[in-house]
Amino acid sequence: MIIREKYLETIRGFYDGDLIKVITGVRRCGKSVILETIINEIKQKTDNIIYLNFEKTSDFSKASNAIELVKYVRENRKEGKCYCFFDEIQEIDDWQVSVKDLRLDNCSVFVTGSNSELLSSEFLTLLSGRFVSFRIRPFIYKEIKEYSKELGTDISVADYLVWGGFPGRFTNISLEGTKAYLSDLESTIVVNDLIKRYKIKKEVAFKKVVNYILCSNSRIFSARSIHKHMKNDFSDLALSTVTRFIEWLKEAYIIDEIPQYSTKTKRELQYYGKIYNCDVCFNSLRANNNRYDLDHNLENVVYNELLYMGYNLKVFTNNGKEIDFLATKGNKTFYIQVAYSVADEGAYKREFGAFANLDNSNQKILITNDIVDYSTSTVKHIKLEDFLMMEEL
């Protein structure tokens, strides 16, 4: 497995500190491998290390609650600073209490988890100012290229646009194997992490909403619009229930939502946001007859890549015309449009027209899968294959 230095360099400065290191992200995005890499680095200076994976029955039996966890560490640690690594710690009841105690007992604590309850209001209250969090995501394309080289394979941009970057899928050489792996992953997240955890009674309605949302990536939405769409099939489905469903998908890190920003109002627009899947495979699993949604998947891929590069993102509304991203980093701001192709005249006018009447104080960028350079005097065109290998814009 590759060394994901981009993430490690942000965590490394906290190795010896007393802040609790919280590593989050969707299931199977590589959190455990990040943890393993950190352990290997710390082993270079000490063996005073304790590791427990609470998804393993053997480890869970050693410490199934907060009191047992503290006791286990105290009985198995050595003198001096102890480095504690707890994988999928949300399986332990009241785990926040245990890590708080261990932090005060000369322990450097690292925890991973697959839902944002790790950063719940209760946790924030209990450990306010005493933790630092890091979100891990599936591979972006540069990481895929590095990993595929290690495996002796070659993953194309087209493959990435359809099946995304979950690390575990790259050991499946067949299309059937890839689909089976990703379908199992989604089922585990939806059934085990959400339906069972929240004891969802309207299971059919929930799965229908999930299906609708995951094939609606890279689109403006509101809970009200989704509720209206579902009303014909589920007349008793309340708007508040739909809102909770959306929030639970965010908690499992399956989807992200970014707000809209308008030049006209000079403020963020309320109620409406834009959905992006943590990985485009969740859209592609729903494709019929291999008709994959490459237009929206490409925009979703650009979203994930820009986050990896460190940009803060919003949707930009320019006098009623949507610009896909207002991307900011440091003191630089970019207007970014994304399209699969602008070879068609209509697509060309639509995508370039979104920039109309904007001044040139910020760089305007168009990203497409075209091989022809469509740059103008005011808009920089970046080919997708070039963008995917960039470190920053």
Image (cartoon, grey):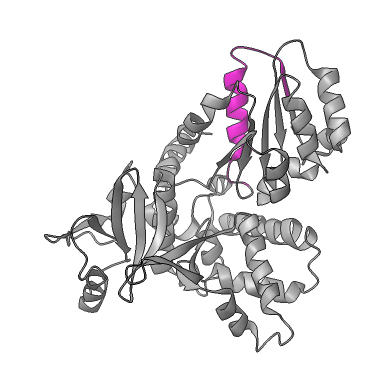
Quarter the N terminus occupies: top right
> Which residue extends farthest left?
377
The location of residue 177, given as percent across then percent down, is 59, 55
What segment carries the magenta color? 28-50
Residue 233: x percent and y percent? Answer: 68, 86
Residue 253 lies, in percent from the top left, at 60, 54
Q: Please state which of residues 350 and 320 is positioned toward the viewer in this rendering.
A: 320
Looking at the picture, does residue 90 appear above or below residue 40?
below
- Which residue is drawn at the image coordinates 65% and 12% (left, top)? 46
Q: Is residue 86 above or below residue 263?
A: above
Q: Identify the image quadrant of residue 48.
A: top right
Seen as rendered, the residue at the extreme front is 266
Asked if residue 5 is positioned above or below residue 341 in the image, the reply reads: above
| The quadrant where residue 178 appears | bottom right
Q: Is residue 300 above or below residue 101?
A: below
**Is residue 334 left or right of 60 when viewed as pictured?**
left
Can residue 356 be seen in the rendering of this structure? yes
Q: Position of residue 99 (x, y in %)?
A: 75, 32
* 30 magenta-colored: yes
Does residue 62 show up?
Answer: no
Judged left or right of residue 36, residue 268 is: left
Q: Residue at x 32, y 68 (%)?
A: 263
What residue sits 52% from the left and 66% below the top?
Answer: 283
Is 16 contained in the magenta span? no
